[in-house]
Image (spheres, rainbow, N blue to C red):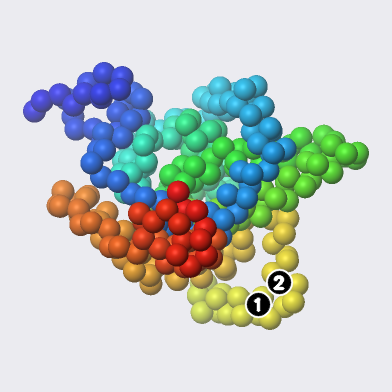
Amino acid sequence: MGLTVCPRCGYASEEPMDFCHECRLNLNPEYEVDSSIYEHPDDRKALSAVKKMKPLNIAVRLFLDKLGTPWINAQFLGGAVRVGPRQFPDLYRMVVKAGKILAVKELPKTYVVYSPVMNAFTLGTNEEPVMVLHSAIVDEMDEDELMMVIGHEMGHVKSNHVLYHTVLVALRQAASTFLAGPTALLLRGLDIALLTWFRKSEYTADRAGLLVCGDLDAARRAMIKLCLGSKKLFDSLNLDEYMRQLEELDEEKIGKWSELLMTHPFGIRRVKNLEEFYNSDIYENLRGRAESFLAGKPVPEMAVGMATCPNCGATVAPTDRFCSNCGYRLR
């Protein structure tokens, strides 16, 4: 068997590598996935608006220039355990599989940190993302459920959500320092604007998680476990009764505003989004391509029309530059 050599850093391995073990570069460039095809239209529209906010982008530049990822890396290098081919190899294999399915340019650095709370998150910049898994998730979820969670976080990486996620965390910490005055008002305004987008970005990441997991039941289980936080209670959960709560929520006039200051949408709405995406042609097409790629078979072309306009939600071709329905610039 010949050597596999990374074209970027020159790292060589006698074993096949999907991602370079040294610099984490994707070594399967022939397989591509356009995230705009499956991204939630509200996510793309809201992120476009966020990028136009001058005060926020000044904060982003300050973050890049003054903080960046060295501080974040130092925190997890010292207080967590990094996942790699020689450290937790089974977990690393799952991270690699998620990266392959979504065709990320390079794997995020991945860590496991002790916490009894089932959670996972991604911080850093779009160029240097860091994925963190709480130990409770690894302990309490089966492999398919864990693939949903890892795929969700990898979805944030694929859609370039990571930088603004990190800026939101930094802004919220800064806002807690300034309790009053113009600075506090500015930070609160930016915070609400980012939260509005952040919640929508979760719908996109959930779709990515489902593409990686490939099992709607497992994806739903993972979502509900994250909301419930109790494996013991989950074992006796009635899914139909749980989903009936959504009907009552939508009947409440205040329901649509009750997420205003939350970082994540209500779990019940996320489950509904998963079900709708699972039943779409976009999911079927993308998942079929992924399965062919994983099996070493020829990957079929994407069907024309497998994309949506982020402004109006109309179906558009992946190659279109403008939406034919509303005229929105797509690229």
Q: Which residue is mark 1?
A: 250
Mark 2 residue element: helix
Residue found at the far right of this picture: 181
Q: Is 14 on the left or on the right of 96, as rendered?
A: left
Asked if one can make out residue 151 in the rendered structure from this viewpoint, the answer is yes
List x then y, in percent, for residue 290: 27, 54
List x then y, in percent, for residue 23: 36, 25
Rounded to the nearest angstrom, the CA distance separating label 2 from label 1 is 6 Å
Residue type beneath disc 1: Asp
* Label 2 CA crowd tier, 10 Å (few <14, some 14–19, many 20+): few
Residue located at (72% from left, 78% from top) = 252
Q: Is 240 on the left or on the right of 213, as rendered?
A: right
Residue found at the far left of this picture: 1
Residue located at (42% from left, 67% from top) = 315
Residue type beneath disc 2: Gly
Q: Which residue is mark 2?
A: 255
Q: Is 56 on the left or on the right of 159, as rendered?
A: right
Which of the two discs, 2 and 1, labels the residue nearer the N terminus? Answer: 1
Asked if one can make out residue 133 in the rendered structure from this viewpoint, the answer is no
Q: Quadrant of residue 53?
A: top right
* Residue contact at pointers 2 and 1, CB within 8 angstroms: yes
